[in-house]
Image (cartoon, rainbow, N blue to C red):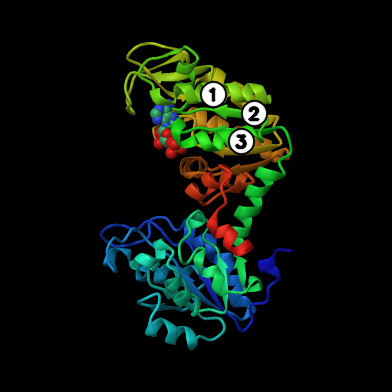
Amino acid sequence: MSAFSNYNFAGQKVLIRVDFNVPLDKQSFAITDDTRMRAAVPTIKKILSDGGSVILMSHLGRPKDGPEEKSSMKHIIGHLSELLGGTTVLFANDCIGEQAYLTASMMRPGEVLLLENLRFYKEEEKGDVKFAEKLAKLGDVWVNDAFGTAHRAHASTAVIAQFFPAEKRLFGLLMEGEVSSAEKVLHKAEKPFTAIIGGAKVSDKILIIENLLERATDIIIGGGMAYTFMKAQGGTIGNSLCEEDRIQTALDILKKAEAKGVCIHLPSDSLIADKFAADAQTSMSPSNHIPDGWMGLDIGPNACEQFANVIKRSKTILWNGPMGVFEMEKFQHGTKVVATAVAAATQTGAFSLVGGGDSVAAVNQFGFADKVSYVSTGGGAMLEYFEGKVLPGIAAVKG
Ligand code: AMP
């Protein structure tokens, strides 16, 4: 059983760093996607059912200069109460200061207090120790359940840890799930281990590919970044996405992979288009012979088959980044085929982890979220974890 599940929170005031940075409608401030809030509910409920009280702190939006209406946490009180089955949510219009302390001190078991946006203070992102100490005074136990900000050494995500003894700083259930899934892939991967890396740019994914060269047996490279690899190997790629200054990097990656015995799979063919638009004319082409004036916007049928075969014989799968411009219907097929193959492999016993903004959006959009083993909530944090970096929000809890 996990440390969090084992803990009895009865009578404790539990200060939880959550990631309630949800998108809000610009006019009405209504929440347009509550995924991040829903993800924290099991942690909150466990504490409340133990007889603890919960103090929630988060950031919202990117306030530049102190308090501002559009980034106030008050916009989410109503929905939070609904998600907690009608529990009253108290609100402090400052995350530190008299009102917050007074409300926190009078809380009874089963009550929930939401603090105003942490980033109304510049000290939060600066990781200011005094500010962290002021936050720490609000609770007896600190729980970090904000994987989305785990790669930041901010006051509430990491610096605050020093004000709680080791046994009173814990991961919440969301964070435990994220960390154990990532660890499973990074350190306990059953082989064959296939990493599927897609998306637009080689430059964004170099570090993750380099780290995976040490661990994976197969790396599938799709999406726009595949064309830099094609060009590096002497192919012609028309107007496809290409990072000229990464051609050498691509060659280095191929060379390293060969030396390490890691199999790199590039798409043999592509669905090409005469413009970057939903109504473009399309055709098929070998990925290394794309005619002038055309660009590869999705992987082709042979590549789909090639990739699906590799995925289906894998025991561990990590997927970050789409295979094509999946936002446009015409160029979704490759990403859908990969999602289907990942789901099929999962059903026959593989462990599959999907992470990073766009691949998560794709599995959600295509209805595959519950057919993979784990969907990570943290885009940047997940990438940095897989690049092999130490995440301050995780290190702070582990001590
Ligand atoms: P990333 O954030 O790096 O994972 O990139 C995701 C973006 O890459 C999505 O918006 C896709 O539309 C885009 N993308 C994927 N394949 C291609 C491609 N072949 N050409 C241009 N953009 C692409």
| Residue plotted at (42% across, 67% down) | 128
Decide: few, some or many residues near mark 2? Use Cα within 10 Å; few <14, some 14-19, many ≥20: many
Q: Are marks 1 and 2 in contact (CB under 8 Å)?
A: no
Q: Which badge, 1 or 2, comes first in the chain's sequence?
A: 2
Q: Quadrant of residue 77?
A: bottom left
Q: Is residue 100 above or below residue 289?
A: below
Dot 1 falls on a residue whose secondary structure is helix
Q: Which mark is residue 212?
A: 3
Q: At 74% across and 63% down in the image, what residue appears?
A: 1
Which residue position holds label 1? 252
Q: Is residue 249 above or below residue 167?
A: above
Tell me the SS state at disc 2.
Answer: strand
Q: Which mark sits nearer the N-terminus, 3 or 2? A: 3
Closer to us: 349 or 10:
10
- Residue neighbourhood size for the residue with mark 1, other residues' Cα within 10 Å, grouped as few (<14), some (14–19), many (≥20): some
Q: Could you tell me residue 132's position as x and y percent?
A: 46, 71
State which quarter of the image contains the C terminus: bottom right
Q: Is residue 242 visible?
A: no
Q: Is residue 213 left or right of residue 392?
A: right
Question: Which residue is the site of mark 2?
Answer: 218
Residue 299: x and y in percent read 49, 23
Q: Looking at the picture, tell me which residue is in the foreground, 78 or 125.
A: 125
Is residue 137 depicted above or below 313 in this figure?
below
Q: Residue at x 41, y 59 (%)?
A: 21
Q: Is residue 125 left or right of residue 158?
A: left
**Mark 1 vs 3, N-terminal side:** 3
Total number of numbered labels?
3
The quarter of the displayed image where residue 25 is located: bottom left
